[in-house]
Amino acid sequence: MLVPSLMDGLLLGFVYGIAAMGLSLIWGVMDVINLAHGPIIALGMFGIYLGFTGLGLNPYLMLILVIGGGLLLGVLIYWVAVHRVINAPHLSTLLATFAVNMIIIGIATAIFTTSPRNVDFNLGGFPVGPITLPWTRILAALASVLVTALLYLFLYQTRPGKAIRAVSDNRAAAELMGIPTSWILALAFGLGTMLAAISGGLISTFFPFTILAGSSYELKSFVICVLGGLGNPLGALIGGLLLGALEGIIPAFMETSWVPVLEFVLFVLILLVRPQGLLGSKT
Amino acid sequence: MALLEVQGISSSYGEVQILWDASLELERGRLTALVGSNGAGKTTLLRTVMGLLKASQGSIRFDGRDVTHVSPHGKAAEGIVLVPEGRQLFPSMSVYENLEMGAFTKRARGNFQANLGRVYDMLPRLKERAGQRAGTLSGGEQQMLAVGRGLMAQPEILMFDELSLGLAPFLVLNLFEVLQRLKEEGLTMLLVEQNVQMALAVSEYGYVLAEGRVELEGPSRELARNEHVREAYLGI
């Protein structure tokens, strides 16, 4: 009973990691907490849903479109809602992203209503000893590892990626060195949004959802950011795995409804004892 | 015609006006000094020239063109480069990556290898520390990296804000030797310093800034002999 549940949780944890990476990237680079994170995750879900039920596209093929759409949407959100308040106090950026959150939920509710949808897609299972793991979850975990590796390559090996790190370290100095920092921030926001959309897209292949479904993943992303520390993709992935493992283990001992309670107890405890994050560095 | 002409600029932090109608010119190939005591507005002037702070009045011309409203990254792309006060490195990135970021602009990118060789030659410590995170360098090494990063940008004009601040005397000498070499190569530079004696000793022309206004200007040798300068800044 415990082993399959733990395996399920761990595989899901990879996807949580991707969602948290999106939140953490934006938070770490521009000190903006993106309250539209949840609805963007849900938009990723609906992207796959529309491609699958509307056009009959394979979800993994559709994911490529979701990736492109997520990136563009993020760049757009940055220029429309975030850029003008980027140097304002935190409350302004919180309100700006919260407004985006409300707009997305409002429009999507009008179009899709809030009745649950699901992507009726099944690839069968993969037997590992006595347990069987659904392929959709295995592929989601593999895709998450791939995305993390690509994000690392981008941030550490390419010019725009390094520019994102430079802007994150010292925005004024980056500007003085000729880096167009506003565009770099827009790019970082786009990447963060893209990661959220990817995680939503992957989750849609195994759970039903509504446009409001993103909010619980948004909250999980906050917990993971605290577990893994900010601005570190690997930290987010490990944090995601920890949370996934917890979700796998807890139901073996108590009611499933205790899961969020314990998650947030953990969240508060870490903030009290180690505010830089379990895996984060002091700086 | 001077390479950079700053004409009557004023600027403020919020309601507080710091800079009042300040003008200065950087002649091509000359090392110019801008001196003044702490709080005279030297850093504000540099920030305004770069466009980090908006000029409420006046104009900035570079090579005859008006660049008053060009963004800081646009100015860097033109070759106007500032080595800011307090190093302002990218602490989580390696020394090599900091130099790479210095060469971000299109004009600098093509000459990356040649410029890197030159910087390593002038500041050999940077080569030894290439893989180390910039945040873990000593203060002197950080200042060297800030200078090296500025040179990687292939500047037409290189401006230094408080190059010597907080450094041990032998390190200051070391960096001033680098300035000397750059001067011989014909680079146009502006040295902004609290260390008035040192700045007037290495520069050819100088400006004295006091309470946000240009108080005096002239050949550095003459400024160093000026009664008022000697009394107010050199303590003689």
Image: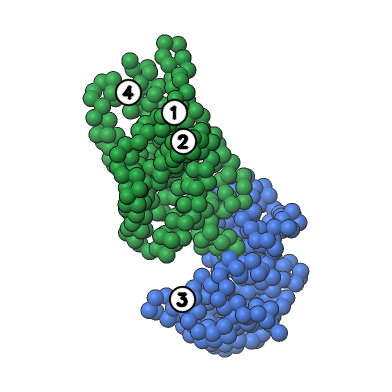
Q: Is residue A85 left or right of residue B224?
A: left
User: Which chain does the residue under circle 2 lie in?
Assistant: A
Mark 3, other Cα within 10 Å: few <14 / some 14–19 / many ≥20: some
Name which residue lies at 33% across and 56% down: A99
Q: Which mark is residue A121?
A: 1
Mark positioned earlier in the residue sequence (1 or 2): 2
Q: Which mark is residue A249?
A: 4
Q: Tell me whether marks 2 and 4 sit on the same chain.
A: yes
Label pair 1/2, CB-CB below 8 angstroms: yes
Q: Identify residue for label 2.
A: A52
Label 1 element class: loop
Q: Identify residue for label 3.
A: B39
User: Which chain does the residue under circle 3 lie in?
Assistant: B
Q: Looking at the rendering, in which quadrant would you find the N terminus of chain B?
A: bottom right
Q: Check disc 1 and give the amino acid type.
A: Phe
Q: CA distance from mark 4 to mark 1?
A: 27 Å
**Is residue B89 visible from the viewing direction of this image?**
yes
